[in-house]
Image (spheres, rainbow, N blue to C red):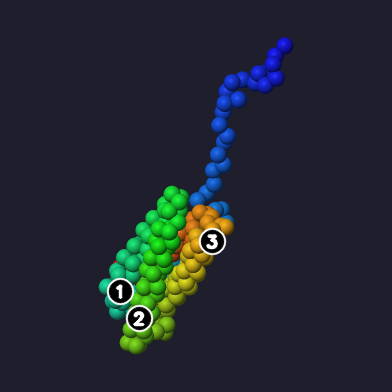
Amino acid sequence: MTAPGRDLPATAQSSPPVRERSLPGGVDMWVMVLGDLFFFGCYFVTYMVFRALSVEEFSASQRHLNVGIGVTNTVVLLTSSLFAALAVIAVREGALRNARRLLLATGACGVLFTLLKVYEWHSEISRGHTIHDEFFGFYYVFTGVHLVHLALGLLILGIAVRELHDSRGRRPAIVEQSVLFWHMIDLLWVVIFALLYLMR
């Protein structure tokens, strides 16, 4: 007679439990990010169509943009994404204090980006470049909607920092979600920068 517990194969008894794999940032955040990217993609296609119909007018208006500020803002956001990625690594390693500092540095870069963009808007408007110009109409819509997303990103980063301060919580998933959204903001700006500042 077989002893209890010995009727199973050895492989069945010793196999380790299967770890559940989850998408970094969570499915809900990915749906939100992909939805935003889709709508921005539609805006970008619309811009390309209008630009193709009035290449000379768009190019003439485009030359009034301050490429130096655009490059600076791009570097600022790329740096912020580096801080954000390092924050995720720090959380996964249990270095919560370092993760908080990195998220705060990410947010500081976002604030700096906002200040530079507001200065650029003021400079362009003071020189008479308003939405009555077709190119600048797209410029203000693109950069304005992007800035709204950046403000939302700062709010989400603030929630993540607060989560790391809460000894009862400290869920790494919150940090991953905030960083995923922030990377989307960075990606959108890189495309906007290329379309508005660099394309000739």
* Farthest-out residue, top: 1
Q: Which mark is residue 119?
A: 2
- Front residue of 35 and 55: 35
The residue mark sitting in front, 3 or 2, is: 3
- Callout 3 amino acid: Asp
- Front residue of 67 and 74: 74
Q: What is the C-alpha distance between the residues marked 1 and 2?
A: 9 Å
Q: Residue at x 37, y 63 (%)?
A: 80
Q: Residues within 10 Å of mark 1 (few under 14, many from 20)?
A: some
Q: Which residue is mark 1?
A: 69
- Callout 2 amino acid: Tyr
On the image, the x and y values in percent for residue 9 come to 61, 20
* Farthest-out residue, front: 167
The residue mark sitting in front, 1 or 3, is: 3
- Callout 1 amino acid: Ile
Query: What element does badge 3 sit on?
Result: loop
Q: What is the C-alpha distance between the residues marked 3 and 2?
A: 36 Å
Mark 3 or mark 2: name the one nearer the start of the chain. 2
Query: Compared to 185, does 115 lie above or below?
Result: below
Q: Residue at x 57, y 26 (%)?
A: 14
Mark 1 or mark 3: name the one nearer the start of the chain. 1
The quarter of the rendered structure image containing the N terminus is: top right
Q: Which mark is residue 166?
A: 3
- Front residue of 127 and 48: 127
